[in-house]
Every structure is written in C-alpha cells, then in structure tokens.
Amino acid sequence: MARRGGIGRRRGQGRRLRRLSGEAFAKLSPRKPTETLADYIPRLASVPLDFQPGTQWAYSPAAGIDVLGRVVEVVSDLTFDQFLRQRNAGLQPSTIRFPLENPRFPR
C-alpha cells in the first residue's frame, strides 16, 4: 500500500470538514462500530477524491485499510475479520513494549 489511492488526510482537513454540509460530513466521517465494510465503502466512494490516484501520496484516516478489507471480503467471501483470523500467515499474537527510560519518550 503506497498511500497513492486519492484518499488523503492533509493538513487543514479539519477546517475542510467543518465547512462541509452535514450530509457531506456524514459521508466522510469514520466508520461506525456497528457499520460493516459493505455498508461503509459505498458511502466513502460517494465523496470526491482528494487527488487523482497515483499522482501523489497522503496518509488516510484508516480509509485505505477499509477499502483493502472490503476487496478481501468480496474476493474471499469472508468478512475481513474472519479472513484475518483464518488466514493469518502463521502470525502469533504479539506485544511491543518500550522501556520507559528511552529518551525519546516524554516525561
């Protein structure tokens, strides 16, 4: 995932969202916990892209992984969650711990 799909989270996006109408804001707002990817992706697709795909890159607020997840659902005929649980490439649950004395962490 090269973050070049046209969905971005750019500086000033908060101001952009505040200027949108209620309906347009609802389309851009994050996926609700009870909403499936099958419901959310068409809503996301109705919002214009921030740029032409492939012309630049930008971080997206999880929309990229949601789109990828929906593609996996359609191809595999499983929910994204089911797919990740069944086809996890042999990965085991893991934890990352950082020492608190690391100078990069604020005190």
Image (cartoon, rainbow, N blue to C red):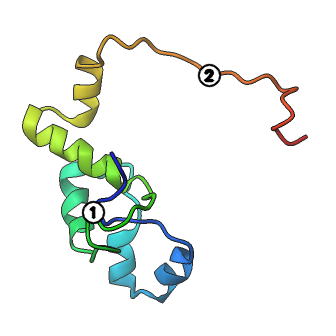
Residue at x 42% of width, y 86% of height: 20
Identify the residue under disc 1. 54
Let me know if residue 31 appears in the view. yes
> Residue 96's quadrant in the figure?
top right
Task: Work out whether residue 106 or residue 77 is closer to the camera in this orientation and state it.
Answer: 106
Numbered disc 1: secondary structure = loop
Q: Residues within 10 Å of mark 2 (few under 14, many from 20)?
A: few
Residue at x 42% of width, y 11% of height: 92
Q: Position of residue 31 (x, y in %)?
A: 36, 56
Residue at x 31% of width, y 66% of height: 6
> Quick check: 2 above or below 76?
below
Q: Nearer the viewer, mark 1 or mark 2?
A: 1
The span from disc 1 to disc 2 (Cα, nearest Å) is 33 Å
> Quick check: 68 above or below 96?
below
Q: Is residue 103 left or right of residue 7?
A: right
Identify the residue under disc 2. 96
Mark 2 residue type: Ile
Mark 1 residue type: Gly
Q: Position of residue 57 (x, y in %)?
A: 40, 61
Q: Position of residue 89 (x, y in %)?
A: 29, 16
Task: Work out whether residue 53 or residue 38 is closer to the camera in this orientation and state it.
Answer: 53
Q: Is residue 7 left or right of residue 17?
A: left
> Quick check: 68 above or below 90?
below
